């Protein structure tokens, strides 16, 4: 029997937590932060919240998503964009 919180792929897990990602995105938009998308929140959590953790439960993922610090997320996205600009300039 497959447990409710077992997923076959990262894509399945992303779809499962998408309502939480959308909720956090709506909060950011209310804060007038409009250049961040759900995938940015997702990638931030993967790289900063869940990197060294194992066997996380859905409620832990949702909690982390809903409690992402806005300033840290902004800094993460800006750094990512700056790195992408650097890669373009180096070509």
Image: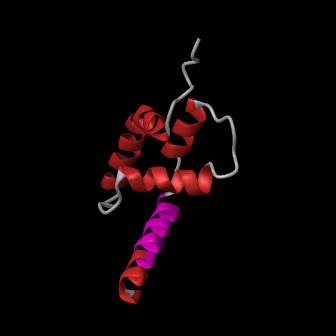
In the image, residue 73 lies at what x, y percent?
48, 61
Residue 61: which quarter of the image? top right
Nearer to the camera, 9 or 52: 9
Task: Look at the image and tell me in which quarter the N terminus lies.
Answer: top right
User: Taking 30 as reference, is 87 left or right?
Assistant: right
Task: Look at the image and tell me in which quarter the C terminus lies.
Answer: bottom left
Q: Residue at x 56, y 44 (%)?
A: 64
- 81 inside magenta stretch: yes
In the image, residue 45 lies at what x, y percent?
54, 51
Nearer to the camera, 53 or 78: 53
- 67 inside magenta stretch: no
State which region is magenta. 70-83
How many numbered marks, from 0 up?
0
Residue 40: which quarter of the image? bottom left
User: Taking 58 as reference, is 28 left or right?
Assistant: left
Residue at the bottom extreme of this rendering: 90
Q: Residue at x 40, y 35 (%)?
A: 15
Residue at the top extreme of this rendering: 1
Q: Residue at x 39, y 38 (%)?
A: 18
Q: Residue at x 44, y 31 (%)?
A: 16
Residue 21: which quarter of the image? top left
Q: Is residue 47 placed above or below 65 in the rendered structure?
A: below
In the image, residue 65 lies at what x, y percent?
50, 44
In the image, residue 29 lies at what x, y percent?
31, 54
Main SS of residues in magenta: helix
- Coloration mode: secondary structure
Nearer to the camera, 33 or 78: 78
């Amino acid at each position: 029997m497959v447990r409710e919180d077992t997923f076959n792929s990262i894509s399945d897990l992303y779809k499962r937590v998408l309502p939480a990602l959308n909720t956090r995105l709506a909060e950011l938009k209310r804060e007038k932060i409009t250049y961040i998308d759900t995938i940015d929140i997702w990638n931030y959590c993967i790289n900063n919240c869940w990197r060294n953790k194992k066997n996380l439960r859905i409620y832990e993922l949702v909690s982390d998503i809903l409690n992402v610090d806005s300033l840290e997320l902004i800094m993460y996205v800006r750094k990512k964009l700056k790195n992408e600009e650097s890669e373009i300039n180096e070509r």
